[in-house]
Amino acid sequence: MTSPPAPPAGETRRPQPESLTDLFLSLTFLALQGFGGVLAVVQRELVERKRWMTREEFVEEWAVAQIMPGPNVVNLALMIGSRYFGLRGAIVALAGMLAAPLVVVLALALLHARFADHPQLAGALRGMGAVAAGLITATGLKLVPALRKHPLGTPGCFALGAASFIGIALLRWPLLWVLLGLGSVGCWLTWRRLGSLEGAPR
């Protein structure tokens, strides 16, 4: 299997997947843990345990993964695989995210089709949804410190987050329009802020 390139002389080698096999197995294990609340698992595995990404990198790349078509965690896996192994890494990452979970999902679909009428099953699924929401909220709170290094600062990021919440949860605007509108505003404000920090008026 291909290994990632060695770092230049004098630079410390940062943690990264050792091979395509390591990438595939790591993402398969991650995917099998992430049913119903994958954000919390992805953040813990890639940032805290394996340290393939810093907290700031995770926040930035997760934002990109969310605005791309398709499942955000699959998009993130593609970016990680491509970063370390190019096109082959992206393909292996995709296979790692989908192969084993596909088998599990098919098995669960068969079981659900057989027992969907049982009220106990409906109650259990509602309880799992509440747990998933709690996991996502806790992960979001853990990532808040990373916003301190953003050019807009924590208040500016919170303002954009609050506007997104109001638009989606309260006003029921379509997600696409919220992303395009507030995302464009966020990019423009960041660009202006970076310009002022570098001393170039924009």
Image (cartoon, grey):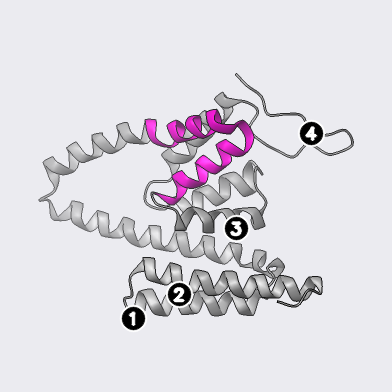
> In terms of secondary structure, where does tag 1 sit?
loop
- At label 4, the amino acid type is Pro
Q: Quadrant of the rendered structure where residue 8 is?
A: top right
In the rendered structure, the answer to whether residue 46 lies left or right of residue 69 reads right
Residue 122: x, y in percent? 19, 55
Q: Give the x, y percent position of residue 133.
A: 40, 62
Give the percent coordinates (x, y) of residue 30: 49, 40
The residue to which callout 1 is attached is: 171
- Taking the spot 44% from the left edge, 40% from the top edge, the residue there is 31
Q: Secondary structure at mark 4?
A: loop
State the SS at label 2.
helix
Please report whichever mark, 2 or 4, sits nearer to the chain's N-terminal start: 4
The residues tagged by marks 2 and 4 sit, at their Cα atoms, a distance apart of 40 Å
- Spatial CA span between label 4 and label 1: 49 Å
Upstream in the sequence, badge 3 or badge 2?
3
Among numbered discs 4 and 1, the one appearing first in the sequence? 4
Magenta span? 71-99
User: Which numbered dot is residue 164?
Assistant: 2
Can you name the residue that lies furthest to the right here? 10
x then y, percent, for residue 75:
47, 46
171 relative position to 115: left or right: right
> The residue tagged with tag 3: helix, strand or loop?
helix
Q: Nearer the viewer, residue 82 or 202?
A: 202
Disc 3 designates what residue? 60
The residue that appears at 59% across and 58% down in the rendered structure is 59
